[in-house]
Structures are given as structure tokens and as C-alpha cells.
């Protein structure tokens, strides 16, 4: 699955939980939800980390999705790298709207 989609989904959950805290009168419950939101954002950032292992896994997924054509390794590697960098940027900016 595309890392951008995964990060976007996690961040959407974080925004949903943030809205929920505005409707809760219990401060302790709201505090715990806010902690969960922070964990979600950190998790999104970890998922999108463009290190060699994440890139390798994503490039393999792209290769499989495309029917395993020979000779396109670099293309899929660069695509995976680009997707992870975009997902990382999305996760980094999560604090602005989540």
C-alpha cells in the first residue's frame, strides 16, 4: 500500500480524535486522547521514514504490483523513495492541522 495513503489515513484518525476531545468534559480522558494523537503522529512519521529498508520494501511492493517486469529496478526504487519522502513531509506537517 502506498505510504502516502497510510500516513494520510493515520493523520485523518488523529484529526478525528482531536475533534472528539472538544466534546469531552473529562480532562483526564481528553488528555489521554491527546497523548494517543501524538503517538499516531509519531507512528505516521516512523512509517514514512525513507530509510533503505523502507525503500526496499516499498520498491518490492511496486514491482509486484506491476507484474514483476525485469529491468525496472531503478525506476521502482526511485518511485518508492519519492513516495516515502512525500509521506514523511505529510507526517512532519501533521502538527499544523491534526
Image (cartoon, rainbow, N blue to C red):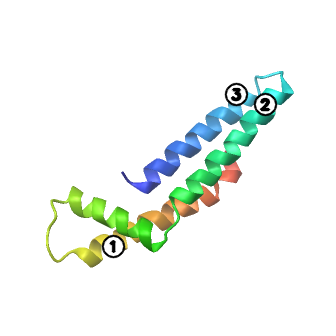
Of residues 32 and 14, the one drawn nearer to the viewer in this rendering: 32
Q: Earlier in the sequence, mark 2 or mark 1?
A: 2
Residue in the image at 58% along x and 37% along y:
13
Query: Residue 33: image x %, image y %?
Result: 72, 34
Residue at disc 2, secondary structure: helix
Residue in the image at 14% along x and 68% along y:
69
Disc 1 designates what residue?
77
Q: Left or right: where does residue 69 sit relative to residue 41?
A: left
Residue density around tag 3, few if under 14, some if 14–19, many if 20 or more, within 10 Å: few
Residue density around tag 2, few if under 14, some if 14–19, many if 20 or more, within 10 Å: some
Task: Measure how far apart labels 2 and 3 are at the Cα level.
Answer: 8 Å
In the rendered structure, are the residues bearing label 3 and label 1 in contact, judged by CB atoms less than 8 Å apart? no
Residue in the image at 56% along x and 59% along y:
46
Task: Measure how far apart labels 2 and 1 are at the Cα level.
Answer: 42 Å
Disc 3 designates what residue?
20
Residue at disc 1, secondary structure: helix
In which image quadrant can residue 24 be found?
top right
Using the rendered image of the protein, determine whether residue 82 is visible from the camera's viewpoint.
no
Residue density around tag 1, few if under 14, some if 14–19, many if 20 or more, within 10 Å: many
Q: Left or right: where does residue 62 sit relative to residue 46?
A: left
Q: Residue 48 carries which label?
A: none
Of residues 44 and 20, the one drawn nearer to the viewer in this rendering: 44
Query: Residue 36: image x %, image y %?
Result: 68, 40
Residue at disc 3, secondary structure: helix
Task: Measure how far apart labels 3 and 1 are at the Cα level.
Answer: 39 Å
21 above or below 53?
A: above
Q: Quadrant of the C terminus?
A: top right
Q: Residue 30 carries which label?
A: 2
Q: Earlier in the sequence, mark 2 or mark 3?
A: 3
Amino acid at each position: 500500500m502506498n505510504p502516502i495513503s497510510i500516513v494520510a489515513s493515520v493523520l485523518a484518525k488523529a484529526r478525528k480524535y482531536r475533534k472528539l476531545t472538544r466534546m469531552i468534559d473529562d480532562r483526564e480522558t481528553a488528555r489521554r486522547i491527546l497523548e494517543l494523537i501524538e503517538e499516531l503522529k509519531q507512528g505516521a512519521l516512523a512509517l514514512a521514514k525513507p530509510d533503505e529498508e523502507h525503500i526496499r520494501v516499498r520498491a518490492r511492493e511496486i514491482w509486484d504490483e506491476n507484474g514483476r517486469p525485469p529491468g525496472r529496478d531503478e525506476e521502482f526504487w526511485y518511485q518508492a523513495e519519492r513516495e516515502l519522502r512525500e509521506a514523511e513531509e505529510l507526517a512532519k506537517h501533521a502538527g499544523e492541522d491534526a
